[in-house]
Amino acid sequence: MSHGEIIAPTGFHARPRYLRHMEKQPTQFADRAALVAHVKALSPLAGDDGVSDTRGGRAAAERLLAAIDPTAYGHSRNYLDGAVTRLSPYIRHAIVNLNEVRNRALEMGDGKALEKFIQELGWRDFWQRIYAQNPDWIWRDIEAYKTGFAPDDYADTLPPDIAAGETESAAMNHFIATLKTTGYLHNHARMYLAAYIVHWRRVTWQAGARFFLAHLLDGDPASNNLSFQWVASTFANKPYFFNLENLQKFAGMDAPCDYHTNKCFGGSYDDLAVKLFPHMEAL
Amino acid sequence: MSRFIWLHEDCLRATHPVFAHAPQARAVFIWDDAYMDAMHYGLKRRVFIYETLCYLPVEIYAGDTIDTWRALQNMAGASDIITGKTPNPALKAIMQTLREGLQITTIADAPFVHLDAAKDDAGQLRRFFKYWNKAKKNAFLYDGRP
């Protein structure tokens, strides 16, 4: 089947058919809406929070692979409009693998220009190796919080205003809406939102990780949860947090980052540390 | 007695080595709703996975993974299953259960870097730069090896 050409299956009508055991499920549909309807019928409890425009399949991955710009990535990757590849959902499910991506990058430049790009591929490899060695680290605190708080000081459930994207921060609301609509967030936006959930709202990293996994197309137990633990400080020597100046610098071109709609991030790092971690010794 | 490929969510590629290992085998993906619930996958992810499957040479069955493989064992003579290696403990547990009566062989994908296992501090990996100081020797080489 060529990419984008999805043909209607014969007799694709009656919902009870899906439930018959050992019946081959269709792989051809009249259009994407029919495919989505079929997935909803197979997974009636998966929710109905919309579908991403990002298409599945190897051909979509190959188009992105052909378009990577590792040198520009190295210069701009921390900015929300930087030259990121958007390959992560495909890497997550091995639709394309890290070896292919690295080999493609090697065709495009020398080692120095590729350094950051290939190192970021290394992060994915690192998380997978950790996962294989320590599968029990994925959902439990690997280390104690270094925030001055005990695990019980954090709420176990995600507050409804975060789930709905109706928080005090316009930037966080923008990130939440993007996450829920597209199934993707730039890595820096993930760090901001994760830090907001864990440190500003004092919610367990596990609750935040579940929220991300429910929406991210590339959500991976290792990359997602261990990164959350890095932000929380249960897999790092100190908590990750940020201030408004940092948010404006790296996200200002993408998200509403003015002070009046993001007051909670205002101030210096020292001021914020006192506010967020009042029981912690100086960072 | 038949050989099958079990294509699970960590090997959704027609060029994955499982296919080269068993080129004549029927490939099967099992749409296990309870598994995806346990993985916290929402509708967006499930559509992405299903759409990916539509471009693969794979038969899709809906049901519990273990029950479906038992049914394929009884109805189609499945005896020997080739599948992708995964770090996911839930998939590993399913494989372990299936080993009661079925032969399960896991095939690893091409690695990002070839690390010397003897110097890999197996079980000791904790901070990224300890890993990277070893990995970077091969990470900038084609296929991750000299």
Image (cartoon, rainbow, N blue to C red):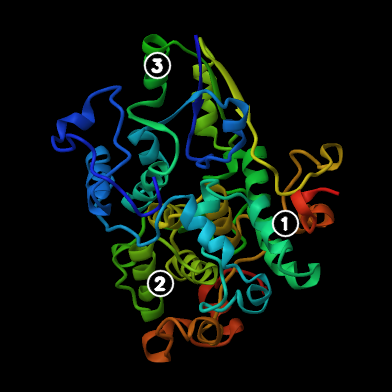
Residue A101 quadrant? bottom right
**Amino acid at dot 3:** Leu
Q: Which residue is mark 2?
A: A175
Q: Is residue B84 visible?
A: no
**Amino acid at dot 2:** Phe
Residue B79 location (% of width, % of height): 51, 12
In percent of the image, x 67 and y 44: which residue is there?
A129
Q: Residues within 10 Å of mark 3 (few under 14, many from 20)?
A: some
Q: Which residue is mark 1?
A: B128
* Element type at mark 2: helix
Residue A29 location (% of width, % of height): 26, 45
Q: Chain letter of disc 3?
A: B
* Element type at mark 3: helix
**Amino acid at dot 1:** Phe
> Gap between marks 2 and 3, in whole Å?
44 Å
> Gap between marks 2 and 1, in whole Å?
27 Å
In percent of the image, x 59 and y 76: which residue is there?
A78
The circle drawn on residue B107 is none
Q: Is residue A43 visible?
A: yes
Q: Residues within 10 Å of mark 2 (few under 14, many from 20)?
A: many
Q: Earlier in the sequence, mark 3 or mark 1?
A: 3
Left or right of B146, for residue A31:
left
Left or right of B77, for residue A29:
left
Q: Which residue is mark 3?
A: B72
Residue A105 location (% of width, % of height): 69, 63
* Element type at mark 1: helix
Viewer-nearest of discs 3 and 1:
3
Q: Residue furthest left?
A: A14
Q: Quadrant of the C terminus of chain A?
A: bottom right
